[in-house]
Amino acid sequence: MLNQEFQQKLRKYAQLVVRKGCNIQPGQEFLITANIDVIEFVRMLSEEAYLAGAKRVTVRLTDEQTTRIGLDYMSIEEFERFPDWLALLHNMTAREGGAVLRVESSDPQAMTGVDPMKVVANQRASQQACKEYYDAINHSRLVWCIVGAAAPAWASRVYPDIDIESATERLWDAIFQTVRVDQDDPISAWEDHRQSFSRRSQWLNDMKFDALRFKNSLGTDLTIGLNDAGIWKGGGDALIDGTYFFPNMPTEEIFTSPSRLRAEGVVYSSLPLVYNGNIIDKFSLSFERGKVVQCYAEQGLDILQSIFAIDDAASSLGEVSLVPWSSPIQQSGILFLSTLFDENAACHLALGLGFPDCLEGGTELDDDALKAAGVNKSATHVDFMIGTADMSVVGITNEGKEVEVFVDGEWAGGL
């Protein structure tokens, strides 16, 4: 893993993340959260951030095994009390106008068997204690980015039939391809990638659909209402001051926040969902008047149900995303067992929090006004994949006209 070619690609990746993903500005604070297994990459990220002009880089290293031990032994009451020092770290980063980066490298099954209600309690406490931080993210005042890094435990889940070292190397290669680091100039490639989303986003915004209907052979038959002032976005995001960044690398989606009260029908998952170190697979959700009224899963039903226990809004949708079956990640044939990657392989939905910037003037509205306009407000946001090779998506106008958006998993509109 220490050969020169690998080191060059890793350095290009670090430069890409700092300069395009986070778009670090001179004099800016930078907070990195990552697992100790990818410390070499974190060191490169730190150096590249300083080279880009960051005034201070703060690194918070985590360890899954230690986290698991805490979840096994600590009482649920401890998870209901979020540490003051950790809340201060996040809230001060937001107050200082910093940028935050999470490096995702977790074992998809690291938390199997953990009491899910401890995770729920910690999530609730985090949202309350770090409200200033989450408000800054949700209202486009704070740059945030999530990227992947290959760690042995994760790699062994993705490639279980080969030795860990080979699996880790292969996962790194796959990550490099998905984020275009294998190209001569990844930064320019990402700028071109950003521009590629504009045509279809504009078409969807011009159509002003009232609803979308999803159907496929798995049994999905779901109609999702859209907000009158909704905005379709894709290819990156911008702060209210115009600073452009990429919240997720990779990204292949065009998305919006639907009406929180208007989802009717049933939807079936098309890929496993990894949620807090647990796998939920082969599940379905039935919606009435925007809320999940019934759920089923062949694997991880208790974990799926724990999502709805976070708050009342966790059973409503906060995001609908369109991803063609020809997505490079889908065509790679790799099941990454990471939502960061797998959500870019297929159309997906998200339970919980909606995005204020997916509504005209939404970043200027408070929580009550956003809810009144149809944007969901929740302490969680959980993406799950629903796209298939035979997915049909039909847009329905206010006049009742039906327009094909996807046919057989591919774009039919906005060409």
Image (cartoon, rainbow, N blue to C red):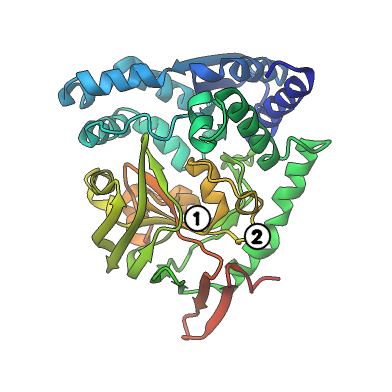
The amino acid sitting under disc 2 is Ser
Residue 62, position in %: x, y?
43, 18
Q: Which residue is mark 1?
A: 358
**Residue at position x 56%, y 80% in the image:** 403
Quadrant in which the C terminus appears: bottom right
Q: Residue 199 versus residue 264: which sits nearer the camera?
A: 264
- In the displayed structure, would residue 323 be above or below residue 21? below
How busy is the neighbourhood of tag 1: few (under 14 within 10 Å), some, or many (20 plus)? many
In the image, residue 26 above or below residue 230: above
Q: CA distance from mark 2 to mark 1?
A: 25 Å
Which badge, 2 or 1, is on the more N-terminal residue?
2
Q: Is residue 126 visible in this depiction of the protein?
A: yes
Residue type, label 1? Cys
Local secondary structure at mark 1: helix
Residue positioned 50% across, 51% down in the render: 357
Name the residue rendered at 80%, 38% in the picture: 183
Name the image quarter holding residue 162. top right
In this rendering, the answer to whether 37 lies above or below 140 is above
**Foreground: 164 or 258?**
164
Quarter of the image where the N terminus is located: top right
Q: Residue at x 52, y 18 (%)?
A: 37
In the image, is 157 to the left or to the right of 25? Answer: left
Residue 326, numbered label: 2
